[in-house]
Image: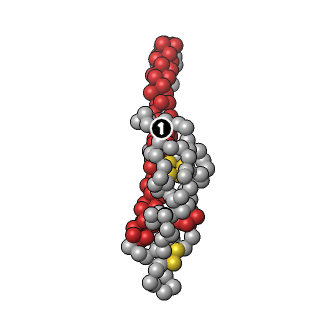
Amino acid sequence: MKLSPKIPRAAQAGYTLAELVMVCFVLVTLAGIAMPTAKFTQKRVKESELRQQLRQMRNAIDEYKRYSDAGLLPIEVGSEGYPEDFETLLEPQDLVGQIDKQMRFLRRVPVDPMTGEAEWGKRSTSDRPDDSSWGGENLFDVFSLSGGVGLNGVPYEEW
């Protein structure tokens, strides 16, 4: 019968306290680096959604204006060819000179990702660019009602 050689006690031991402290230090350092990155990534995604929603609404307003300038939509006196409000963009509009043909410019009013509501600031052609209230005549531009500031340092209401 052959006896197995004795393994020294030091070789059987697990990790030392110094090794455990070093591993914990590395993990804490990596977590400290990852946390700010994750925080800014979430904000960057919301800002990207805001840009997309603003672009969608502004394109709908511009498309309505193009149709009215081309004479395909009836224009009310003094409206300059812009829609009256969001509801005008949501409702089907009869095209002039075309039988049974309608055009809808927006399916729904998008939700502002910064406020979580489907309410937006509006500007008309008679409003100054820095006005926060809408004149009510026609819908020329939209902006976010959020009081926050973007990662680029520009307030969301100026986007």
Which residue is depicted at the point 51% across and 85% down? Answer: 100
In the image, residue 98 sits, relative to residue 23, either above or below, namely: below
In the image, residue 42 sits, relative to residue 125, either above or below, namely: above
Q: Is the image coloured rainbow, by chain, by secondary structure, or in one colour? A: secondary structure
As helix, strand or loop, the secondary structure at mark 1 comes to loop
Which residue is depicted at the point 42% across and 71% down? Answer: 67
In the image, residue 66 sits, relative to residue 128, either above or below, namely: below
Q: Position of residue 76 (x, y in %)?
A: 51, 69
Which residue is depicted at the point 41% across and 36% down? Answer: 152
Question: Residue type at mark 1?
Answer: Pro
Q: Position of residue 129 (x, y in %)?
A: 45, 45
| Quadrant of image for the C terminus | top left
Q: Position of residue 118 (x, y in %)?
A: 59, 53
Using the image as rendered, state which of residue 51 and residue 43 is in the foreground: 51
Q: Position of residue 12 (x, y in %)?
A: 50, 18
Residue 23 seen from this side: no
Using the image as rendered, state which of residue 152 and residue 89 is in the foreground: 89
Read off the residue under disc 1. 155
Residue 80 seen from this side: yes
